[in-house]
Image (tube, grey):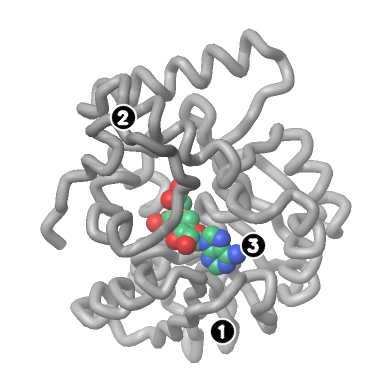
Amino acid sequence: MAREKDNIYAAPLQQMVDFRFDERVVSVFPDMIQRSVPGYATLISNIGTMAARYVQPSSHCYDLGCSLGAVSLSLRHAIDKPDCKIIAVDNSEAMIAKAREVLAEDEKSVPVELRCADINEVSIEMASVVVMNFTLQFIAPELRQALIQKIYDGMLPGGVLILSEKLAFEDPQTNQFHIDSHHAFKRANGYSDLEISQKRSALEKVLIPESLSQHQSRLHQAGFSFVEKWYQCFNFISMVAIK
Ligand code: GEK
């Protein structure tokens, strides 16, 4: 896929509007996520590698908040069990339309069902793998426990939930260290201070990060027997939770 450069926040904006996953974002999304999430490519490939260890025959794999389907593609190339289906969900029509094009260019035969829907309203059934790669952070905090519970209830014993999130840290100095490190990462990737600060304002009410202990206790409360952080770069982490 040719990468169009993200310069959405490059010029000063008269009025700040909340961030939305619209057509403009879709057209630059691969560039945006690559230059904004430290280790994005490492996460995507290792999600496939990990999923391959937990996927069960005749089960479903979910990619919740699939955007352009990067996780679905990684799963599709890693899954080697018969009769599996990937269900990829996003509530942005623009994302789903583009994901459909991206997946059509891939020759692997594991079926991927794309659904334009709110993940709070999608049923989870016979799941051996569920991935939320930077999606839960966009869900209203009061809905998060019910969503995690629904996922747990729809999973097969031995199934894995892979949950990647931007974190907030309880200790202010630690929090500031990670925010500053992330901003330095973005600067090193060509974003200006203006772009970084305008994007931060646009995301303020939309992306609500929580602490690692909040995530861990929610996962344990839902019933997951094993919860482990397997990846961290600055304030970006990924966890596994096994039923
Ligand atoms: C990747 N996982 O490339 N229901 C469905 N989708 C939602 C909802 C919702 N309620 N809220 C937000 N989304 C991807 C990256 S991006 C992360 C995920 C980021 C969708 C939203 O439309 C967007 O496509 C995705 O969640 C979050 O690995 O951009 O920081």
Q: Position of residue 71 (x, y in %)?
A: 41, 62
Q: Of tags 3 and 2, which is closer to the observer?
A: 2
Q: Which residue bears the numbered disc 3?
A: 160
Looking at the image, which residue is at 43% across and 17% down? Answer: 181
The amino acid type found where label 2 is placed reads Glu
Sooner in the amino-acid sequence: mark 1 or mark 2: 1
| 17 relative to 180, above or below | below
Q: Which residue bears the numbered disc 1?
A: 57
Q: Is residue 142 left or right of residue 37?
A: right
Looking at the image, which residue is at 28% across and 77% down? Answer: 103
Mark 2: few, some, or many residues within 10 Å (few <14, many ≥20)?
A: some
Residue 96, quarter of the rendered image: bottom left
Sooner in the amino-acid sequence: mark 3 or mark 2: 3
Residue 193 has which mark?
A: none
Q: Is residue 168 left or right of residue 24?
A: right
Looking at the image, which residue is at 70% across and 53% down? Answer: 140
Residue 97, quarter of the rendered image: bottom left
Farthest residue, direction top: 173
| 131 relative to 46, above or below | below
